[in-house]
Amino acid sequence: MTIMRHEIEEAIPVAERLIARASEIAKIGAALADRKPAVIMVVGRGTSDHAAIFARYVFEYALGVPVALGAASILTQYGVQSANKNVALIAFSQSGAGPDIIAMTEGARVAGALTIAMTNEPTSPLARAAEHLVDLGAGEERAVAATKTYLAELVAIVLMAAGAARAAGRSVEWAEHVAEIPNEMRAALKATDSWIAADYASGAVHAMRTATRVLIATRGFEYPNALEFALKMRETTGVFADGYSAADLLHGPIASAGSETPAVLIETDPATAPSLPKVAERLRSAGVPLLRIVTSGAPSADLLPLPISGGLLSVPATGIAILALVESTAVARGQNPDAPAGLSKVTKTL
């Protein structure tokens, strides 16, 4: 077993521990709602950037407040502070050591913004810089490619957004079944393992074992998982993978699809799934080896059904499935996903 695979499995008890702390995390969400920010700014780098994008979707959905993806370079390279007292900033970082994310948090707090840090290192500079801390409690990540911290971020975002929505007097019906998240993650991982063990001789995942480029697409809440799938493929296999909103894919990039470029289409959100068949049709017409990740159907070389409900609360379950797919693909390609060449565990940029 690779370290990466071990840490993927560890994400399930991490999610259980976070849900056991739901009331604590909800209080931070309530503090955000009580400030009534005009804008929520989210910021991160790499994998944490994808968690921030998930937060962008979830908080905008839960609170009906505009959520913007912050650009650290505006502050660190151009010297412009865009945060103010009407802003709430949520900063995401596995290590809590990224100088640019720390600088944004410190600057926003001085400017009067509400600041929240979500990190796996509760004594880190980022944790100290923010007014509020969500300690992910995922434990040490030994593999270079972060997995359990990313999945923990997804769960913590849901818990914090539910607390914010409840404090704001908005509907939290969407969050009623958060306690089922770990069970869905467990079921999705088991289904994915069975699918991998079937070792289909054709299809997109088989093609990914030799391809030099891969496309991953979806829409809505699952979009960050498409981005994370692509990033992890690049990190662990060296394959140039692209993650897209399916809507954006149709606006031009699909022209680059072909028989040598396998694709994965994530269709697990009931709200967006009806818009995806035409994307699948376009990809197939271009001869693309296509894997569809869905919530029903019989497993086959081009269909991976996950026994999950789908939608917002299932994003961590889909996330654990795609990480398992990436790890198995890296191993099948003869790569070491624990220590990819040229990468280090913590990358610091300003």
Image (cartoon, helix red, strand yellow):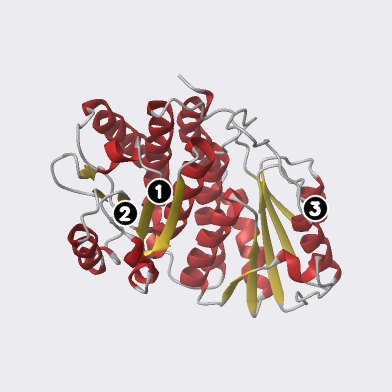
Q: Residue at x 26, y 63 (%)?
A: 273
Measure how far apart labels 1 and 2 are at the Cα level.
18 Å
Q: Dot 2 surroundings within 10 Å: few (below 14), some, or many (20 or more)?
A: many
- Does the image show residue 130? no
Residue 193 location, x and y as percent? Answer: 31, 30
Mark 1 lies on a secondary structure that is: strand
Q: Are marks 3 and 1 in contact (CB under 8 Å)?
A: no
Q: Position of residue 150 (x, y in %)?
A: 54, 45
Dot 3 or dot 2, earlier in sequence? 3
User: Residue 52, image x and y in percent?
Assistant: 58, 59
Task: For marks 3 and 2, give the CA distance.
Answer: 34 Å
Picture residue at 69% right of the left edge, 73% below the top: 35
Q: Residue 71 vs residue 172: left or right?
A: right
What amino acid does circle 2 point to? Answer: Ile
The residue that label 1 is drawn on is 213
Residue toward you, 317 or 19: 317
